[in-house]
């Protein structure tokens, strides 16, 4: 499948602080890919590198096969960018900003898509964006992106400032739009439930590297939380558990319950616990939503 | 791009136009009052003998302030929450977008300053010999060029992302603008005017340095 985004061996530092080294990933055409990671793992840095507002120390980002640093300006017509905090020109009103952008995207601009969303805003057409609430500004920014109708959307924390109703509306609209028209979306969000409803694939970032890139179904169906009571009260997690690479973040609760996360089948987890000579009560397996899975993969700090 | 710049700056431009033309009008009223009180002949003699910029000297820093004010109104909103990213993401060459933004600002200032000159010329022409009002207009020319340079240098500073570099740029701006105010002796700048014009034109490239640094994420 053709890749719309390709990041190859990206290394970036802020001063002496390493953000990541030799990071590589790609986003195939027609997929919605969510970038998940704790604060400070480099999500916004990745968006900035992709949109060409940051130069990596080494490596390169390519969109539609072109290096973002030297990209043909006309290619930007096909890239919709939602900047962090949903920034838009504050000095314009709803009509002026639509009028301004429309001239840059002849033949692809969908005025009606924008005004359809704006109708739900309940603001006067002449009201300046600077006088709108954060949520309303976000809606204007998102409406403009949908009107641009690009082949690729890059959304940095798209759900910030949106109320639950509008978030749901936007997620459904975006998903239907992307799937029906074969658009590619690369996004980050702090609200993992939104990503769960929206994305086809996800990349989970840890400090300095990518922990995992896979279809969402792989995590939903294959990743589980296992827990069991240990007969004797342990002060620390046994070393052999910590050394097992297939067990993610084993931890002991205050009541002495062992908790761990894994992609392994229940029987296999049981077998490995027995092989470690770790006496334990009945092993329970829980299905996880994406947020729990994310915590299971990255840990609770 | 002109549409965006117009929406952003139209009220500020109106204010700049009113203030600069108001100041010019005020200087002109002083001039006409002096003519009425002392007579035209006395003023002519005073202007020839004194060899100093009578009646326009209060205009000295007005174009400079107009240039700085316009740059602030035009470029601070671009840097607010890094809005410049939106501008740079438009499907046009970055260089062209920068020139269009600066071109709009320079054209606006030129219209404003041109009106100032027109008012001065129309007001002084009936009472003074062409040599005398020509001399006054020439005295004010470096100050108006300073206004254009101040606009471009302010844009260079505002578009810069790093505070340390902004302070450095501010010092450079101060030193550069001092060149325009070395003397107010009538005719002192005449041989130097082409150099000042070339300097102003060269300043157009400075904001590109800031934009280039912004694109590299230097803060």
Image (spheres, coloured by chain):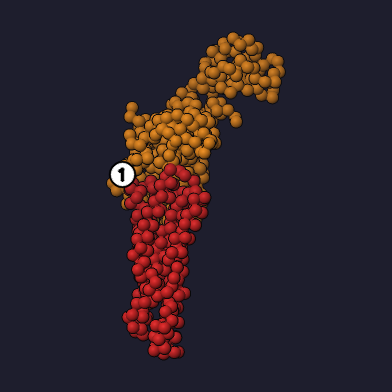
Residue lying farthest to the left in this orientation: A107
Q: Residue at x 33, y 27 (%)?
A: A1
In the rendered structure, the colour chosen for chain A is: orange
| Any part of residue B201 in sight | yes
From the top left corner, tell me how far across and down residue A226 is, in percent.
Answer: 58, 20
| Any part of residue A122 in sight | no
Q: Nearer the viewer, residue B48 or A138?
A: B48
From the top left corner, tell me how far across and down residue B156 is, in percent.
Answer: 43, 54
Count of residue discs:
1
Q: Which chain is red?
A: B
* Residue B162 drawn above or below residue A30: below
Q: Secondary structure at mark 1?
A: helix
Q: Residue at x 47, y 74 (%)?
A: B58
Question: Few, some or many C-alpha atoms within 10 Å of disc 1 (few <14, some 14-19, many ≥20)?
Answer: some
Q: Is residue A245 left or right of residue B71?
A: right
Q: Residue at x 46, y 64 (%)?
A: B178
Residue labelled with disc 1: A74
* Residue A162 drawn above or below residue A237: below
Q: Nearer the viewer, residue B190 or B31?
A: B190
* Residue A28 drawn above or below residue A247: below
Screen quadrant of the C terminus of chain A:
top right
Q: Residue A2 lies in what quarter of the image?
A: top left
From the top left corner, tell me how far across and down residue A40 is, in percent.
Answer: 54, 36
From the top left corner, tell me how far across and down residue A27 is, in percent.
Answer: 39, 31
Q: Residue B133 lies in what quarter of the image?
A: bottom left
Task: Using the image, name the chain to which the residue with label 1 belongs.
Answer: A
Q: Residue at x 34, y 43 (%)?
A: A76
């Amino acid at each position: 499948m053709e890749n719309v985004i390709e990041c190859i061996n990206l290394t970036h530092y802020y001063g002496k602080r390493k953000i990541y080294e030799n990071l590589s990933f790609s986003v195939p055409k027609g997929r919605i890919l969510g970038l998940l990671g704790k604060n400070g793992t480099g999500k916004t840095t990745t968006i900035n590198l992709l949109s060409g507002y940051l130069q990596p120390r080494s490596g390169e980002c390519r969109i539609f096969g072109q290096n973002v640093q030297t990209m043909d300006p006309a290619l930007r017509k096909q890239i919709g960018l939602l900047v962090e905090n949903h920034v838009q020109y504050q000095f314009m009103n709803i009509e002026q900003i639509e009028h301004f952008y429309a001239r840059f995207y002849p033949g692809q601009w969908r005025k009606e898509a924008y005004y359809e969303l704006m109708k739900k805003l309940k603001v006067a057409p002449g009201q300046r964006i600077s006088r709108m609430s954060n949520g309303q500004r976000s809606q204007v920014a998102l409406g403009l992106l949908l009107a641009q109708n690009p082949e690729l959307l890059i959304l940095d924390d798209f759900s910030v400032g949106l109320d639950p109703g509008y978030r749901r509306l936007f997620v459904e609209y975006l998903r239907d739009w992307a799937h029906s028209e074969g658009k590619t979306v690369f996004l980050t969000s702090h609200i993992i439930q939104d990503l769960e409803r929206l994305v086809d694939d996800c990349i989970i970032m840890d400090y300095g590297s990518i922990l995992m890139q896979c279809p969402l179904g792989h995590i939903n169906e294959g990743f589980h939380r296992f827990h069991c009571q240990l007969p004797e009260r342990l002060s620390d997690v046994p070393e052999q558990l910590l050394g097992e690479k297939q067990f993610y973040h084993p931890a002991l609760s205050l009541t002495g319950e062992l908790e761990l996360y894994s992609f392994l089948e229940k029987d296999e987890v049981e077998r490995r616990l027995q092989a470690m000579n770790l006496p334990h009560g009945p092993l329970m397996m829980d299905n996880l939503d994406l947020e729990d899975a994310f915590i299971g993969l990255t840990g609770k700090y | 791009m002109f549409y965006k710049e117009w929406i952003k700056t139209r009220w500020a431009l109106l204010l700049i136009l009113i203030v600069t033309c108001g100041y010019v009008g005020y200087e002109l009223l002083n001039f006409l009052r002096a003519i009425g009180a002392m007579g035209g002949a006395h003023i002519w003699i005073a202007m020839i003998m004194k060899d100093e910029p009578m009646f326009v000297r209060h205009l000295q820093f007005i174009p400079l302030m107009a240039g700085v004010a316009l740059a602030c109104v035009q470029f601070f909103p671009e840097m607010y929450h890094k809005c410049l990213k939106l501008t740079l993401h438009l499907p046009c060459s970055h260089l062209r977008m920068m020139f269009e933004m600066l071109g709009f600002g320079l054209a606006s200032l030129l219209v404003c300053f041109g009106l100032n000159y027109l008012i001065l010329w129309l007001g002084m022409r009936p009472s003074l010999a062409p040599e005398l009002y020509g001399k006054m207009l020439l005295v004010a020319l470096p100050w108006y060029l300073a206004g254009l340079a101040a606009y471009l240098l302010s844009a260079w500073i505002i578009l810069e992302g790093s505070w340390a570099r902004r302070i450095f740029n501010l010092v450079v701006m101060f030193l550069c603008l001092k060149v325009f105010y070395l003397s107010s002796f009538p005719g002192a700048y005449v041989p130097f005017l082409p150099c000042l014009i070339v300097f102003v034109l060269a300043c157009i490239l400075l904001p590109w340095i800031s934009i280039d640094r912004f694109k590299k994420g230097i803060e």
